[in-house]
């Protein structure tokens, strides 16, 4: 009887720990996906701004105009125009 109670107590403790670990793992995965999605969106938006800036420079707009329109730094725009 005593051994059986100890076994059941041990089993319950194991299940509690396992549930906590499983929950933490699921939450970590969800958080990682959210962060990855956000970073991907930001990278895509930045890439699109660079493409637009290149097109604007090719159309003859000044680096200052392109920087203002795309909200990219003047330094980045000047690097684009030099490449």
Image: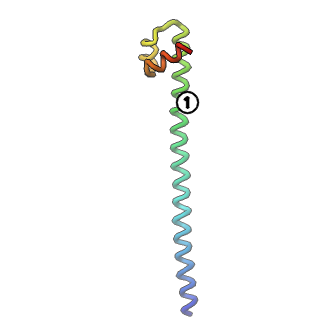
Q: State the colouring used for the structure image.
A: rainbow
In the image, residue 10 above or below residue 34: below
Crowd around label 1: few <14 · some 14–19 · many ≥20 (10 Å):
few
In the image, residue 44 above or below residue 6: above
Q: Which residue is at the far top?
A: 60
In the image, residue 69 above or below residue 59: below
Q: What residue lies at 54% left-to-right and 87% top-to-bottom?
A: 5
Which one is in front, 80 or 11?
80
Quadrant of the frame with the N terminus:
bottom right
Q: Which residue is at the far bottom?
A: 1
Q: What residue lies at 53% left-to-right and 48% top-to-bottom?
A: 32
Q: What residue lies at 53% left-to-right and 34% top-to-bottom?
A: 41
Please count the marks in the image: 1
Quadrant of the frame with the C terminus:
top right
In the image, residue 37 above or below residue 51: below
Circle 1: element type:
helix
Residue placed under numbered mark 1 in the picture: 44
Q: What residue lies at 48% left-to-right and 17% top-to-bottom?
A: 77
Percent position (x, y) of residue 51? 56, 20
Percent position (x, y) of residue 37? 54, 40
Percent position (x, y) of residue 61? 48, 8
């Amino acid at each position: 009887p005593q051994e059986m109670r100890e076994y059941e107590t041990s089993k319950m403790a194991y299940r509690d720990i396992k549930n906590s670990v499983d929950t933490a793992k699921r939450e970590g995965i969800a958080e990682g996906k959210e962060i990855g999605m956000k970073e991907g969106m930001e990278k895509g938006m930045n890439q699109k701004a660079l493409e637009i800036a290149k097109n604007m420079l090719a159309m003859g707009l000044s680096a200052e105009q392109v920087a203002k329109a795309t909200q990219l730094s003047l330094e980045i725009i000047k690097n684009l125009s030099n490449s």
